[in-house]
Image (spheres, rainbow, N blue to C red):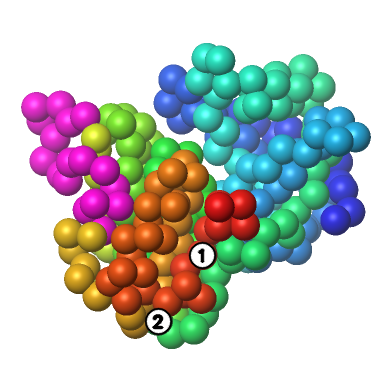
Amino acid sequence: MSEIKCKVASITPLTDVVYKIELTPPAPVAFQAGQYALIDMGEKDKRPFSIANAAYDNSRIELHIGAEPGNTFAGEVLSRMKEEGEISLSVNNGEAFLQSNGLPMVLIAGGTGFSYTYSILQQHLKSGDKTPITLYWGGRHAGDLYLSEALNALAAKHDNFTFVPVVEFAEDDWKGRTGWVHHAVLADHTDFEHMQVYVAGRFEMAKTVREDFTVRGLKVENLFGDAFAFI
């Protein structure tokens, strides 16, 4: 993939450890919703981060980077962006992009894996395709689901979109679902034969989704996630 050099337009905290990065490419970029950028940190050091904006919104590149203490993989990227004000990267990476095959969609995100599903969600809603789409987003705490209000507003606007937030460690005032995010999906669906599923999060979660959902009829060709290229 050919690289481009982007200006760092802004770095905005979304939580104490997650940052929204706005990059400005020299020209609009071509990619598909659900693909990722490879950040160039060295000749043999390319680091993947999902593109959070939709493919139609291609005059910018939005990334959500979780850089908790000790996470040098992300922290070093964030530091370079802050220090240099620009970064080299390639887009149009990955095969787990949006497939418009008419099957109802379930998007499953853990943590900042949300950025992958957010691109797909925005692209689908913009297309006018009325195929049902449901996003399950899991976090350790309610505050980790940093765009919940925006997603609730989207769900109120689009009849074909349902947002299901899931919190692992709920506070007393939490009124939503609790536990692990893929367990919430399994509780809501007994048969995945006529569905497509997109998943982003820890490799362990992706592996469990593949095992548990295929038992309930999900076809492997209708399961998408970058993790499946490695596990």
Q: Which residue is mark 1?
A: 224
Q: Residue at x 32, y 43 (%)?
A: 138
| Residue situated in front as seen by the camera: 84 or 170 | 170
Task: Indicate the amino acid at tag 2.
Answer: Leu
Q: Would residue 24 appear left or right of 191 to someone viewing this image?
A: right
The image position of residue 196, as x and y in percent, is 41, 73
- Give the quarter of the image for residue 219: bottom left
User: Looking at the picture, does residue 215 appear above or below residue 39?
Assistant: below
Please provide the residue range marked out in magenta: 169-185
Q: Which residue is mark 2?
A: 103
Q: Earlier in the sequence, mark 1 or mark 2?
A: 2
Q: Residue at x 80, y 43 (%)?
A: 89
Q: Residue at x 70, y 27 (%)?
A: 77
Task: Indicate the amino acid at tag 1.
Answer: Phe
The image position of residue 13, as x and y in percent, is 50, 26
User: Looking at the picture, does residue 180 appear above or below residue 10?
Assistant: below
The image position of residue 95, as x and y in percent, is 65, 65
